[in-house]
Amino acid sequence: METDHRIVTGDSRSLSKIDDDSVELVITSPPYPMIEMWDELFSDLNSKVAEHLENGDGQAAFARMHEELENVWKEVSRVLVDGGIACINIGDATRKVDGSFRVFQNHSRIINAFEDLGFEPLPELLWRKPVNSGAKFMGSGMLPPNAYVTLEHEYILVFRNGKNSRSFEPGSERRYNAAYFWEERNQWFSDVWMGIKGELQALEQSELRERSAAYPFEIPYRLINMYSVYGDTVLDPFWGTGTTSFAAMVAGRNSIGYELDEEFVQLFEERVEAVPKYSREVIKQRLDDHKEFVEERLAEGKEFKYKAENYDFPVTTKQEKPIQFHSVSNVEQTDNGYVAKHEPIEGTEVHITDDKRAVEVASLSDF
Ligand SMILES: C[S@@+](CC[C@H](N)C(=O)[O-])C[C@H]1O[C@@H](n2cnc3c(N)ncnc32)[C@H](O)[C@@H]1O
C-alpha cells in the first residue's frame, strides 16, 4: 500500500489546488482568535483586526478574526465529500480588552459558521489539558464574587458535511480492515479525553513547538482512525508542523496540508525520517494494550467469542475480526510532498500462547 502526502505552502482561504469533493476528512487546529500569540497573524490576514485591537474593540476584532477563518471553512465545505467529517480543535480565549475581562467563545462561533455552511454538528469531544500551576487562578483570590473559572479544556468540534453519512459497498475491505478494537472504541468515543500529552519528540525542546502551538500526535491519530478508512484523504488547512500528515502516514491514509509559514514546511523534512520507526512503536503500543486488555478479561473469567482473521488473538466483537495493521516501511520525498510505503503487519508477529490465557506480541521493532 502507498499513501500520498501533499504539502502546499500557501493561504488556505483559497484551497485552489484541491478539487471539489476530493477529501474525506478534515482535521485541523486554526490559530485561536483573541489568543494574543495569533494577533499579528490575524492582523496580517486583515488589517482591520489590528485597528480594532488598538481601539480596544474586542468584539469587533473577534468578529473579524472569525471572518478570516470562515473563508477557510467555506473552502472546506467545497472540497469535503458529502458525509465527510470535519474535526476542529479550538479553545476559547479569555482576555482583558479596554479594561474589561471576558471570555471570547471561539467554539460557539465556529459551530454557527459550520451550521450556516450546511454541516450537521455531531457530538463533540472535550480535551482536558493538564494545567499544573497553582498560579493558574485569576481574579480576586479567595474573596467572592470577582474570581474567574480557569479554562482547562479545549474542544474538538465534529461536523458532518450534509445530512447523510458516507456509504460504502457491502463488505468494503478498506473499511473493514480499518476497524479499531472494542476497548479503543470505548475510550476514543467517550466525550472527555484526558491524559493526552506530549508532542512528538523532535519538537519537544524546540522553540518551534511554542511558536506552532502543535497538538499532540494522539489527537489527529485517534480522529483519523475514528472518522476515515484506508485510502481516504485527510486535509489540514492549518498544517503547522504537520502533525496531521505525520498521523495520516502512521495510520495509512493520504493527506494534504496548507501552511503559510514556509519554515514549518521545511522542518517537516527532518521529522519525516522518524515515521517508519514511530509507526511500528504506535502499532506495538496498540497491540500491547490489546494484549493487556485480553489478559485482564481472561483473568476475570470472561470468554472471547471471536478471533481476529489476520492475527492470532481474540477480539470482542465480530466487527473487529478483519482488523489489519500496516507499518510504514519507507517515506520518499516527491515534488510536492511525500509518498509513504506501507507493509501489512503479518499474523505471525502476534500470537496467543497455547493455553489461550496469555497473548504474546512479538517485538515489532526489528522488522
Ligand atoms: C494552531 S497552528 C496549527 C498547529 C498544528 N496542528 C501542529 O500540530 O503543528 C495554526 C497554523 O495555521 C497557520 N495558518 C494560519 N492562517 C493560515 C492560512 N490562512 N493559510 C494557511 N495556514 C495558516 C499558522 O501559520 C499556524 O502554523
Image (cartoon, rainbow, N blue to C red):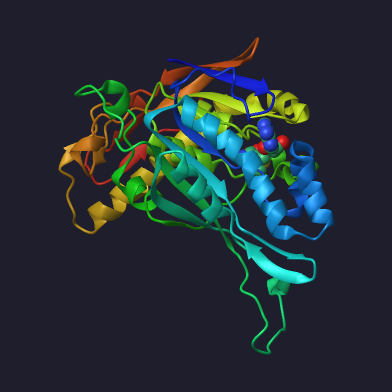
Residue in front for this viewpoint, 348 or 89: 89
| Depicted 104 relative to depicted 290: above or below | below
Whether residue 365 is visible here, answered yes or no, is no
The image shows residue 182 at horizontal and vertical percentages of 29, 45
Q: Is residue 143 found left or right of 97 in the rendered image? A: left
Place of residue 203 in the rendered image (x, y in percent of width and height, measured from the top left): 71, 39
Against 133, residue 58 (above or below) is above
In the figure, residue 81 lies in which quadrant? top left
Depth check, front residue: 94 or 267: 94
Using residue 321 as the reference point, say whether residue 246 is left or right of it.
right
Q: Front-most of 153 and 80?
A: 80
Residue located at (73% from left, 59% from top): 58
The N terminus is located in which quarter? top left
Could you tell whether 108 is left or right of 319 in the image? right
Q: Provide residue 53's location: percent of width, then percent of height.
A: 79, 54
Q: Residue furthest top?
A: 335
Give the tally of numbered discs: 0
Measured as percent of width and height from the top left, residue 163 is found at 31, 38
Please tell me in which quarter of the rendered image ligand 1 is found: top right
Q: Is residue 153 left or right of residue 225?
A: right
- Rendering quarter of residue 206: top right
Q: Is residue 84 visible?
A: yes
Between 152 and 322, the one nearer to me in the picture: 152
**Residue 342 drawn above or below residue 180:** above
Residue found at the far right of this picture: 54
